[in-house]
């Protein structure tokens, strides 16, 4: 089998919108509350009898779990930006084939904590890997599958980092997962600004939600956005 055939055969076209599930991603800097919000949103959808899975990147599959350990371990300070980018995209390829695409094809909605916009913000804007190259590998990994809606939880960097460090300390996983939280503030500022830029450039896909509020207030706003955007399902 030649290279072209392998790539072509990897991606069965998803059913038309309406038959396939809706793909929603949540993005934002460390400590912005994505996991709480993806949990609340997926529960809300399930309560409305919409078949939904909640998933995340990196590490939602068994193979991805191994990749996640390599990516986030605090000892791996010497990892090259390209190695890092390829590992996130490897995780995404496995996640796409094993979880995201099968769910969407059978009409299940997917609520995903981080997706390719994180790669463009962290590895692209902050680590300076070329966007063009990242997008080419993204095409290889997923066929270019983009979320129908991306919710950007925007938060001041100092507040987010403080929350993330406290959480890591409480869960005692600083050594096994602390590599990104250990980055200095300018790194996280670059990530935040990159997310805001992408949201401005793609207003049809992104919605920015102010994340310095109570989880319940944020969840209510997100429920409003989703029920309005996909009104025919509710
Ligand atoms: P995680 O513990 O899942 O953190 P969070 O709750 O903030 O999502 O760790 C994921 C880390 O990986 C986080 O620091 C962001 C980073 N990341 C990238 O750098 N690139 C990516 O493509 C993805 C998906 C995550």
Image (spheres, grey):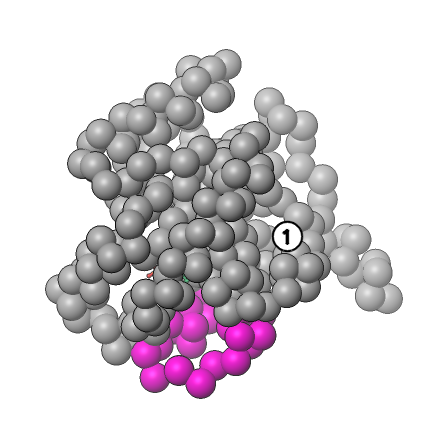
Q: Secondary structure at mark 1?
A: helix
Residue 75 in magenta stretch = yes
Ligand 1 rendered quadrant: bottom left
The answer to which quarter of the image holds residue 209 is top left
Q: In front: 70, or 198?
A: 198
Q: Residue at x 44, y 59 (%)?
A: 190
Q: Position of residue 130 (x, y in %)?
A: 63, 65
| Pointer 1 residue | 142
Image coordinates of residue 127 in percent, x first then y, are 51, 69
Specify the quadrant of the image occupied by residue 7: bottom right
Report the side of 75 relative to 4 (left or right): left
Q: The C terminus appears in which quarter of the rendering? A: top left
Q: Which residues are magenta?
A: 60-86
Q: Where 55 falls versus 227 (above or below)?
A: below
Residue 178, percent from left and from top = 29, 72
Residue at 36% of width from left, 54% of height from top?
29
Is the magenta region chiefly helix, strand or loop? helix
Does 2 sit left or right of 195 as displayed? right
Counting every numbered tag in the picture gives 1
Q: Residue at x 37, y 65 (%)?
A: 186
- The answer to whether residue 43 is seen in the rendering is no
Q: Quarter-wise, where is residue 202 in the image?
A: top right
Position of 15 with respect to 192 (left or right) is right
167 up-or-down from 177: above or below: above
Question: Mark 1 CB in 8 Å range of ligand 1?
Answer: no
User: Can residue 125 be seen in this snapshot?
Assistant: yes
Looking at the image, which residue sits at the far right? 2
Instruction: Give the percent coordinates (x, y) of residue 141.
Output: 64, 58
Quadrant containing the N terminus in the rendered view: bottom right
Is residue 72 magenta-colored?
A: yes
> Is 39 situated above or below 126?
above
**Looking at the image, which residue is at 13% across and 64% down?**
170
């Amino acid at each position: 089998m030649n290279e072209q055939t392998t790539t072509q055969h990897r991606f069965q076209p998803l059913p038309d919108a309406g038959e396939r599930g809706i793909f929603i991603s949540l993005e934002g800097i460390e400590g912005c509350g994505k996991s709480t919000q993806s949990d609340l949103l997926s529960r809300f959808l399930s309560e409305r009898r919409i078949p939904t899975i909640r998933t995340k990147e990196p590490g939602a599959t068994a193979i991805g779990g191994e990749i996640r350990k390599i990516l986030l371990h605090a000892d791996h300070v010497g990892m090259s930006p390209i190695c890092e980018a390829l590992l996130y995209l490897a995780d995404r390829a496995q996640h796409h084939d094993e979880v995201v695409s099968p769910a969407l094809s059978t009409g299940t909605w997917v609520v995903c904590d981080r997706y390719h916009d994180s790669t463009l913000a962290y590895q692209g804007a902050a680590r300076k890997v070329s966007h063009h190259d990242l997008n080419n590998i993204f095409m290889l990994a997923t066929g270019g599958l983009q979320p129908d809606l991306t919710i950007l939880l925007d938060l001041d960097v100092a507040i987010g980092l403080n929350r993330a460090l406290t959480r890591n300390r409480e869960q005692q996983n600083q050594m096994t997962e602390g590599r990104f939280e250990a980055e200095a503030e300018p790194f996280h500022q670059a990530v935040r600004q990159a997310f805001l830029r992408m949201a401005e450039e793609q207003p049809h896909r992104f919605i920015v939600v102010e994340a310095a509020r109570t989880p319940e207030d944020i969840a209510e706003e997100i429920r409003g956005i989703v029920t309005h955007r996909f009104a025919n399902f509710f």
